Amino acid sequence: MKLLKAIAKFPLFVAIIISGLGLTAYGYFSGKYNISVTMDHPILAAVLTADYVATDGDADRATATDAPVATDGDSAAGSTTGNDGAASGDGTKDADSNTGSTGDNADNNGNGAGDNTDGSGGIQTGPDYNNGVKIVQTDEVLQSGKADNVKAPIPTKYQSIAARASRSPDSYNDVNKIALTTAYPYIDVDESYFDDAVFIGDSRVEGLELYSGLKNTTFYAVQGLTIFGLMGHEYAKVGDSTVSLREALSRKQFKKIYIMVGVNELGTWTDTFTDAYKEAIDEIRELQPGAVIFIQGIMYVSDDYSKAHDIVNNDNIIDKNNHIAALANGVDIFYLDMNLAITDDSGYLDPDLTWDGVHLQAQYYSLWVDFLKSHGLDSYMFE
Amino acid sequence: MVFSSMEFLFRFLPIFLVAYFLTKKAYRNITLLIGSLIFYAYGEPVYVLLMIGSILVNHFIARRIQRFHSIEKASGIDCSFERKAWLVTALVLDFGLLFLFKYVNFFIGVANNIAGRQLIKEVALTLPLGISFYTFQITSYIIDVYRKKIVVLKSSICFATYVCMFPQLIAGPIINYPEIKPEMQGIRKANLKQIEWGVTEFIVGLAYKVLLANKIASLWNDVQMAGAYGINTATAWLGSWGYSMQILFDFMGYSLMAMGLGAIMGFRFPVNFKDPYCAVSMTDFWRRWHITLGRWFREYVYIPMGGNRKGFVRMVWAMFVVWVLTGLWHGADWNFLIWGLFLFAVLFVEKLFLGKVLDKVKILGHLYMLFMIPLSWTIFNISKLDQLKVYLKRMFGMHIDGSVVIDGMARFKDLLGTYWWLLLICVVCCTPLPYKLICRFYRNYICKIILLVLFWYSVYQIALGGNNPFLYFRF
């Protein structure tokens, strides 16, 4: 009785304790929660090992996460579409040098001529490589393309990079190469080139829709889109209705189809992703026989963001890009890596161009548009 | 360790409370001290030594000053020089450390900019957690000792506990020692009613932080994702209102949690927030927002400089110094300096004539603050000056080169559609209503059930992740 009287004086406190103990007991006995004291335990790891994620002193509003990088297990779906938590990245103490993920470009010779890409092992820098918008093309490449006016297959080439182990072996492989934009002698085009083009994709393509300034182009994009929902999910606005891509592509014919998806399903195993991508392309090919499909490589995230996440990181993006790039044939399926236009010295998304590390800010979509305008195909490719 | 995290709620706090209540009443300060040091060391395994060192040195100096007081009293010899010397030493040490860790890189940057090249190398130091807060607490203690308001004990336990107490160490109210002296130096009885009230306050603070602040943070995130170049004026203001709500519930929630924890242990902490968004003028606002900081500046800077007793010019100068320092206290960057100057300018104008008008016509005051508050927080929030310039231009409908807005109102309607209900709840919680309701009903069992549900729902949200860091954390 005395106990009950005492409890009556602070029932809320007691209620919390009892419910807390109850929940713990439930978790423990149902096997969901086990007490393991090992050196891997996050608290010990945080204090003892070099993986401790220290916050920068510069941002007075810095993120002070308590978990080290190694145990950050974020889920792929939806974690990048702007609903993520604080934007500023954590700097890790391990300063591993990223030996470049800036894909090389059409500096490679086109059809047949000997190339200089494989085995170089580092970032392509120097007078031909420009971190900005204009991609320099050698005269040789331009001449060889124009002379032929013939559609010949162009296999995708890769540049070797220093190997990096996967931080989520369930989602992606170790990476040791980067896929390069299909080696075609691209021409400069203007806005009207995109009048018969359609852009399909996730929230980043949505941004392109809002801020690119391309007025006569069609956009079928929605936040959170994945390759698995690409064809059947209803997000394509046609007139007053919203239909599936399958439906939209059977109603109207396009000449250029640009696709960028992947950042929302980075947690999926790469092979599964690639198989779904191939299926989608095959279906699009059936619906749109006269179009050229442009697979856009998934845009990178910023270096800080990548270091702080085990699944949504640039290695995973590179792995997936490598696999979908292999689907390109240089005849009616091309691989375009727009990352060249938005990277900085780290080789990844320039932090000055983004606020959350994942999306470009409104005024920088012009960089992407300029990239697309400098990667137009000659008219004979659309016959 | 953030209060709204699993590590704190379900590992540290239960273990600490068990240890605390099992300890004999006379030794509870030691338990609190040890627990607080562990709490701090979790986030700052190295700088905890800095804090301990700082405490020991300051305690020593406090005792020295005290000693000269006694000598003076006993023998009549004038020791004011020695006392002042020790005071100055302590202040130089304490503020020097703060300057080193927080401001030196900023000033090096300024020097380098003026010189046009890398004249001095920047110092590679991270900012220790809570240094801005505990430095101010320590210096308030020393100054109060000098002013003979405090009698320093031989044992440093009480002083150390006062500085380190984990509820207020990282971001809590800046407590003056005389406020809690009876509780600190006396025997604190575990008052069950006080514990219950403490738990109530803690849950409300937790809910404010996790359910309101963390959620409305997405609004500012969404607006900033595209950036000022891609939004219209209405969206810019919406984003700023969202951020204003975020910072209020973040900080107020944290202060409430600190007060609740203090109450559980038997302390009565000073109130830090009194419905700040119900203010009618900026002057009124700063009597309701972060009250303990304003109090510190008033007691130790404004009044010693003369306050409003030495003529108009003196008062204006004192105000200027206080507000520049307040701005810089919040952060070592240009936008904080600009923010401080902005506040000074507004307060000055209010002092001249505007304040009386706003106080009289309350509705005008509220309307005025509806725009001044988000404006003030926008300057506070955006550190990059070029971005800040663009955002402010956007807020005032000025033309921006390179703007890429096609259909700004669509975005505005979209955002409003997503967040209107959350903003409405935030607005209601800005008023005195929730506090009045809690005070009236907290003994009611239905209220307790609601609080219990709120607690577990907050925990659930924390577990889901996306836990926004506390904005005032690196202080």
Image: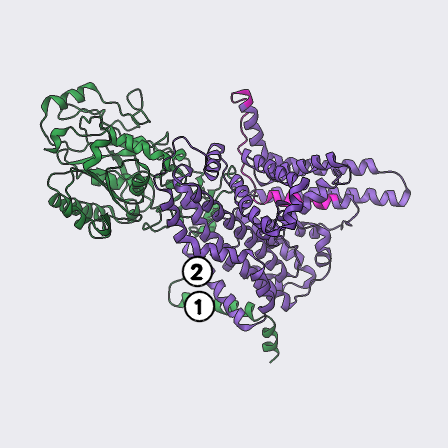
Q: Is residue B3 magenta?
A: no
- Residue A187: x percent and y percent? 20, 26
| Numbered label attached to residue B267 | none
> Secondary structure under badge 1?
helix
Residue A101 visible in the snapshot? no
Is B24 placed left or right of A382 in the picture? Answer: right
Residues rendered magenta in the picture: B114-143
The residue wearing badge 2 is: B460
Residue B33 visible in the snapshot? yes
Bin the neighbour count of mark 1 within 10 Å (Cα to Cα): few under 14, some 14-19, many 20 and up: few
Occupied quadrant, residue A123: top left
Quadrant location, the N terminus of chain A: bottom right
Q: Residue at x 70, y 38 (%)?
A: B91
Q: Residue at x 47, y 60 (%)?
A: B458
The residue wearing badge 1 is: A25
Q: Residue at x 58, y 69 (%)?
A: B441
Instruction: Relative to B426, say whether A374 is above or below.
Output: above
Distance between the alpha carbons at the discs numbered 1 and 2: 17 Å
* Chain identity for the colour green used in the image: A
Colour chosen for chain B: purple
Q: Chain of mark 2?
A: B
Query: Amino acid type of disc 2?
Result: Tyr
